[in-house]
Amino acid sequence: MNLLIGSVTAGSKVGELVSELRNIIEDRVNDKFRQNDVSIGIIIESVPQNSSKSYIRYTKSDNSLIIRFHIVFEEYLEKYKIEQRYELGKTFLEWLKIGLQNKAFIKNNPNLDRELLLNYVTELGQKEGWFVDEIDWSLDLDK
């Protein structure tokens, strides 16, 4: 597997948070699922309200799944970093779940345990304070 997580951002802490998430997840997932010949790219874009649309696209020729989702730049500017992390984590998992349900992707990757992949990503993130049920305000990420 070749999992790539990237961002296109302006301001806020989103770029920094995406880098943190990438460092937690990418290498471990790629190693655990190395027997699967598939690419999954997740791009998080911080855009002005009413900007371009989020999408999921599967390309059979190179067996790649692209998940590109947008967060509203103005909404994230008003949040503390810990709030941004919480919201970004929830949104990341939601889009990953949706992407892994792509019918063509499933058909062409029957040996990929999608549930295990999603659970593993969640577990890795939770160990580092991501994908939690509620914000832990005792953490101060703005320092």
Image (cartoon, rainbow, N blue to C red):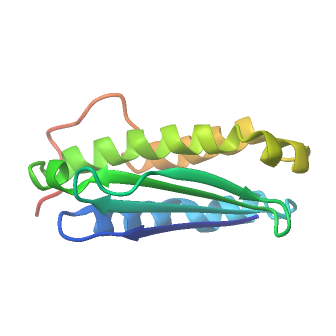
Relative to residue 54, is residue 30 depicted above or below? below
- The answer to whether residue 130 is seen in the rendering is no
Q: Residue at x 54, y 41 (%)?
A: 122
Q: Residue at x 86, y 67 (%)?
A: 61
Residue situated in front as seen by the camera: 75 or 5: 75
Quarter the C terminus occupies: bottom left
Q: Residue at x 91, y 43 (%)?
A: 110
- The answer to whether residue 106 is seen in the rendering is yes
Residue situated in front as seen by the camera: 85 or 62: 62
Q: On the rendered structure, is 97 left or right of 47?
A: right
Q: Residue at x 18, y 63 (%)?
A: 12
Q: On the rendered structure, is 111 left or right of 113?
A: right
Residue 96: image location, x then y, percent: 57, 45
The quadrant in which residue 126 appears is: top left
Q: On the rendered structure, is 89 left or right of 134?
A: right
The quadrant in which residue 87 appears is: top left
Quarter the N terminus occupies: bottom right
Residue situated in front as seen by the camera: 56 or 112: 56
Residue situated in front as seen by the camera: 11 or 123: 11
